[in-house]
Image: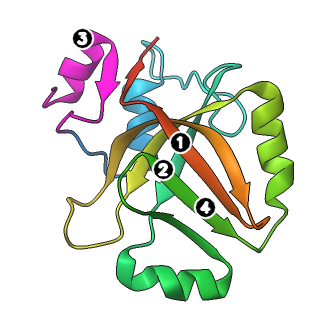
Amino acid sequence: MSNSIKEIKDKKEISVDDNVQYRVIADIVSALFSDENGISKLTGTYKIDSEYKIWFVNLSNKQKKEKDIKSGYSIYLEENDDNIYHYNTTQNIKKTTDKYIEENIKLVVFVNYQDKLHEPGYHFFGIYKFNEILDNKIVIYKRESKTYKLN
């Protein structure tokens, strides 16, 4: 477990067990995905390389989840943190998931909790990969790893 960004950079690995939170997305990009000159190594929409892409998630808390679902969009957890459920009736989710399947994309997930039980800011949540689509509106991503090796 690391307690600082320096410790994470020194071991060149980020873990769900790290006790580090990031205030905003820019803090994550500059701390973990930038070169020695502070220039982002990411391309396009937070793409790290041909295998990995970063996903910044604002989770719906339990109280807000049903309201979010009624509005057509919610990202939430169920029993544990091993699956992320992405409910979306506002756009064609099959198009996005087809691309993830075709390119075998893994998602480096940072979660921003929307509740008072957690420290504010983004936390590393693990490496997730597309698992399945339910009823053509819920995408389930399954955790593959609790760590990510930094370049």
Disc 2 residue crowd, few under 14, some 14–19, many 20+, Cα 10 Å:
many
Callout 2–callout 1 Cβ contact below 8 Å: yes
Q: Residues within 10 Å of mark 1 (few under 14, many from 20)?
A: some
Q: Are marks 4 and 2 in contact (CB under 8 Å)?
A: no
Which label sits in the foreground, 2 or 3?
2
x then y, percent, for residue 105: 68, 29
Camera-side mark, 1 or 4 = 1
Q: CA distance from mark 4 to mark 2?
A: 10 Å
Q: Position of residue 130 (x, y in %)?
A: 65, 41
Which numbered disc flags the more N-terminal residue, 2 or 3?
3
Residue at point 21%, 33% (across, down): 18
User: Disc 2 to disc 3, how far (Cα)?
Assistant: 29 Å
Residue 83 shows which numbered tag? 2
Nearer-N-terminus badge (3/1): 3
Return the disc, 2 or 1, that comes first in the chain's sequence: 2
Tell me the element at label 2.
strand
In space, the residues marked 4 and 3 are separated at their CA atoms by: 34 Å
User: Alpha carbon of mark 3 to alpha carbon of mark 1: how far?
Assistant: 28 Å
Question: Three-letter amino acid code at disc 1?
Answer: Lys
Rendered view: 127 above or below 85: above
Q: Is residue 8 above or below residue 73?
A: above
Q: Secondary structure at mark 4?
A: strand
Q: Would you say the residues marked 1 and 4 are in contact, meaning their CB atoms lie under 8 Å apart?
A: no
Instruction: Magenta stretch: give its range.
Output: 1-19
Q: Could you tell me the amino acid type at mark 2?
A: Asn
Q: Which residue is mark 4?
A: 86
Q: Residue at x 18, y 19 (%)?
A: 7
Q: Find residue 10 and name its label.
A: 3
Badge 4 or badge 3: first in the primary sequence: 3
Residue located beneath label 1 in the image: 142
Amino acid on which the number 4 mark rests in the picture: His
Residue 113 in which image quadrant: bottom left
